[in-house]
Image (tube, rainbow, N blue to C red):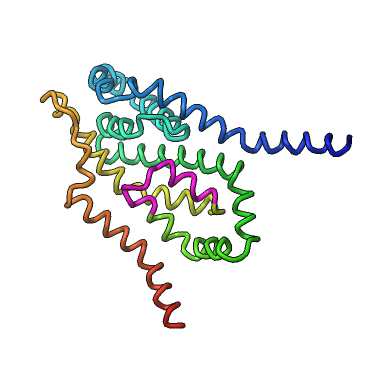
Amino acid sequence: MNERTSEKPAQKSALMRNLPLIVILSVAAIGAFTLRDVLNFETLRDNREALLAFRDANFVATALGFMAVYVLIVAFSLPGATLATLTGGFLFGTWIGAALNVTSATIGAIAIFLAARMGLGERLAARMETGTGTIKRIKDGIDENQWSMLFLIRLVPAVPFFVANILPALVGVSLFRFAVSTFLGIIPGGVVYTSVGAGLGDVFERGETPDLGILFEPYVLGPILGLCALALLPIVLKAVRGRKGI
């Protein structure tokens, strides 16, 4: 009787720890089906005049409202993050828009990170820390190169944003390191897409759609890959020194 009674609080505690992550994943799944036809380029194009008029009359309220929506999109992994970034550029220009975009995306990413760490992250990281053999070596390798790895997963365009938010929570990365690396790491891509959004007025006039493949153009991708190489350099140097026994 006592064992069953003690099991219930433990199960309830586990459920409460995982509840934020469960909510996020549930909302993300629902949003993927219900919002994909709403949060799109056509919606922005059709409502552009109303958005610009409201911005001109209520600039601060528009900025705060935009940030709130962007944070929700990122925090719940809803479709429309790219559209939100373009909208930031369209409404506020490249530099103000990029500042709002990067700040909002970072806040949303922190929300996912904390939810994952509260649920699975703390226990998984503790198990890795007290583990032996391969698991322990993986954890030690991550700990030795945390800054480099965090910047790398933010800079590499192929790494999904959701994965880059969840993975650090599962390996025991501190909130400070996650927040700093997220904010700084998403700036290059954020500025590029915001600048595309800043030119949407002309795109709308021509009846075209924005070229989102610009991130993979050599003149844009080259510098980003250079930053990736710079983030990877400390890991390479440690590996070389380790082989030489330095």
- 226 relative to 242 in the view: left or right: left
> Which of the 4 image quarters holds residue 32?
top left
- 73 relative to 23 in the view: left or right: left
Q: Residue furthest toward the bottom?
A: 245
Residue at the image point whose x is 52% and y is 43% from the top: 113
Residue 13 shows in this picture = yes
Q: Position of residue 166 (x, y in %)?
A: 49, 44
Q: Which residues are magenta?
A: 153-170
The quarter in which the C terminus is drawn is bottom left
Q: Is residue 151 above or below residue 78?
A: below
Q: Position of residue 159 (x, y in %)?
A: 37, 47
Residue 79 shown in magenta: no
Which residue occupies the foreground of this view, 110 or 137? 137
The quarter in which the N terminus is drawn is top right
Q: Is residue 101 above or below residue 232?
A: above
| Main SS category, magenta section | helix
Q: Is residue 68 above or below residue 190?
A: above
Q: Is residue 16 above or below residue 164?
A: above
Q: Position of residue 238 (x, y in %)?
A: 43, 73
Residue at the image point whose x is 36% and y is 63% from the top: 232
Residue 246 shows in this picture = no
Q: Residue furthest toward the left?
A: 206
Residue 160 shown in magenta: yes
